Image (tube, grey):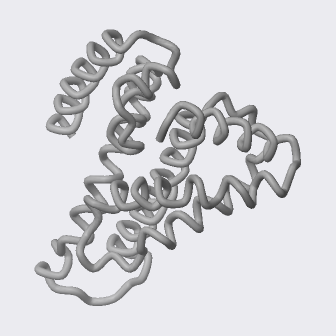
Amino acid sequence: MGDSSISETTELLRAWAGGDQKALSALVPRVYRELRRLAGRCLRNESPDQTLQATDLVHEAYLHLADTSQLDWQHRSHFFAVSATLMRRILVDRARRRTAAKRGGRVAGIDIEQALDVSTRRSAELVALDDALTTLAAVDPRKARIVELRFFAGLEVKETAAVVGVSAETVMRDWKLAKAWLLKELTRA
């Protein structure tokens, strides 16, 4: 996408935030494909029996975005970062419900093989990653935000730097430190 498209997208975001519904109509075709790519990236590590499709995730995220239309959109990367955060929240909430159901939310007799199915493991891993990111955010919010933007949103280093307001070098340094910290945290758990 060229610079003119990026600035046009930013202008549409700002107009939508100002209440212009025509801007939303023009915005959706511009961002929908990228939102689907983002949703696909978020769903990539979900279990194979996952019933949620990328389109469903985009639509559910859109419902949340509609509630935040008054946000002061800084640029298109900011919009995609917020969208990725919403998608992550949706998936983590679903994973928490799924693992809670496995622990007795729906009491039923199951054998040990069923208890260790791929769906529950992946749900538990996503919940563990979310918990570790929450802990990291308490220690170093910028590093947690960078992980969220790079891993979940799939933003490039320069885009992440623009959203966070730091240099690309700082993003790379924080990215490496955050990955090491998360690995240590996840292996400890």
Q: Nearer the viewer, residue 61 or 26?
A: 26
Image quarter where the C terminus lies is: top left
What x and y, as percent, mark residue 64?
67, 56
Residue in the image at 42% along x and 53% along y: 38
Q: Is residue 140 above or below residue 59?
A: above
Residue that extends furthest to the right in the rendered view of this protein: 19
Left or right? Give the position of 156 relative to 70: left
What x and y, as percent, mark residue 141?
47, 21
What x and y, as percent, mark residue 37?
40, 57
Q: Nearer the viewer, residue 58 or 94?
A: 58
Q: Is residue 50 above or below residue 7?
A: below
Q: Is residue 103 above or below residue 83?
A: below
What x and y, as percent, mark residue 127?
35, 52
Residue in the image at 27% along x and 13% along y: 173
Residue in the image at 74% along x and 60% along y: 25
Left or right? Give the position of 137 relative to 59: left
